[in-house]
Image (cartoon, rainbow, N blue to C red):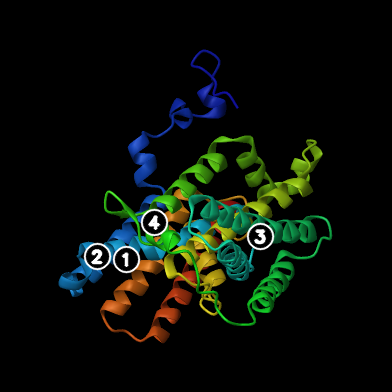
Amino acid sequence: MIAPNEETMSTAVIGSADLYQRPPFWRRVVTSDTFRLFLAMVSLVIVFGVLRPGAFFTVNNFINLLTDAAILLVMAAGATYVIITAGIDLSVGGVLVFSSVTAAMTMSAIGDGSPLTLLIGLAVALVSGAAWGVVNGLLVAKAKIPALIVTLATMGASLGAALLLTGGVDVRNVPFELVDTIGSGRILGVPILAVIALVVAIVFGIILAQTRFGRYTYAVGSNAEALRRTGVNVDRHLVKVYMIAGLLAGLAGYLSVARFATTTLGGHSTDNLSVITAVVIGGASLFGGRGLMIGTVIGVFIPVILQNGFVILNVSPYWQQIAVGAVLLGAVYLDQMRRRKNNR
């Protein structure tokens, strides 16, 4: 809508001209939910830093934080798209494991650590993840099965398929070159895993914010029927969104192999909870139509900082899970309060 100019506007009817002036950029930034979230993250850093400055404020610890957040951020980038469409994807942990298995077995079968072998392994991981994403999308969009049920089923199916392929034993003969370059390599002191995750967040953040695909994603979550009436194939768009989530889970599987030098079959049982927690903390609404990639980036770091700080303070791991769950409940509660306020 175009704001009326001074000649055509009647303040007696439509109010003061101030109503049509946007607040300054800095005021919009300071009053945004994302900025408040950023302050919360900084507060956590300060609290843990004050409690254990010698252990928390170290270069190695900050590198650990970046490395711990990298794989989670890659999966959360895809989950952001799904949640904005008012969907959910519980299968990311299983898809990650399946993709890591197929990639590791392929590279192991080729038997060398050449760049071509690493690229083939990457391609296998991406295709494996995307295939599970397409299955999720088709069942949600075409078969009209609730996303919660579909992705819960594919989570078990993908993990079961990975166990069948490996016989329940981790694949360990991963090319050393993969671990040495991507898993533990650094660029200017920054872990390559973190650089890859940052690039993924930037690319998919730009797609979400600046492209027609991103606008359709928001529209599906806000009012899918209205979007369908404009001629957009909503079902096909949903399949693409779930395919992106699966593709990024596959990439996360490849990065996981690179980091741990094994497939870690039993180490991703809580990935779906961690990913959903990060996206919701970042401001995305479980009811769809709302979310930003920058919020997801910050939302990923908050539970990672919490867990890192608890480890430094020697807090029981059980309390760590309780704390992350409490943060998730708090984020959902705030989302509901925000929706009620907007509906008034």
Q: What is the secondary structure assignment of the residue under circle 4? A: helix
Residue 69 at x, y percent in the picture: 41, 62
Judging depth in this view, the residue of 267 and 1 nearest the camera is 267
Please state which amino acid type lies under the numbered disc 3.
Answer: Ser
Q: Earlier in the sequence, mark 4 or mark 1?
A: 1
Q: Which residue is mark 2?
A: 60
Quick check: 328 above or below 297? below
Quick check: 260 above or below 235? below
Q: Which residue is mark 3?
A: 128
Q: Are marks 1 and 2 in contact (CB under 8 Å)?
A: yes
Residue 337 visible in this rendered orientation of the protein: no
Residue 194 at x, y percent in the picture: 39, 55
Q: Are marks 3 and 2 in contact (CB under 8 Å)?
A: no
Instruction: Tell me how far mark 1 sits from mark 3, CA to CA.
Output: 28 Å
Other residues around mark 4 within 10 Å, as few (<14) / some (14–19) / many (≥20): some
Q: Nearer the viewer, mark 4 or mark 3?
A: 4
Q: Nearer the viewer, mark 2 or mark 4?
A: 4
Residue 261 at x, y percent in the picture: 45, 69
Please state which amino acid type lies under the numbered disc 2.
Answer: Asn
Q: Residue at x 44, y 81 (%)?
A: 322
Please state which amino acid type lies under the numbered disc 1.
Answer: Asn
Q: Are marks 1 and 3 in contact (CB under 8 Å)?
A: no
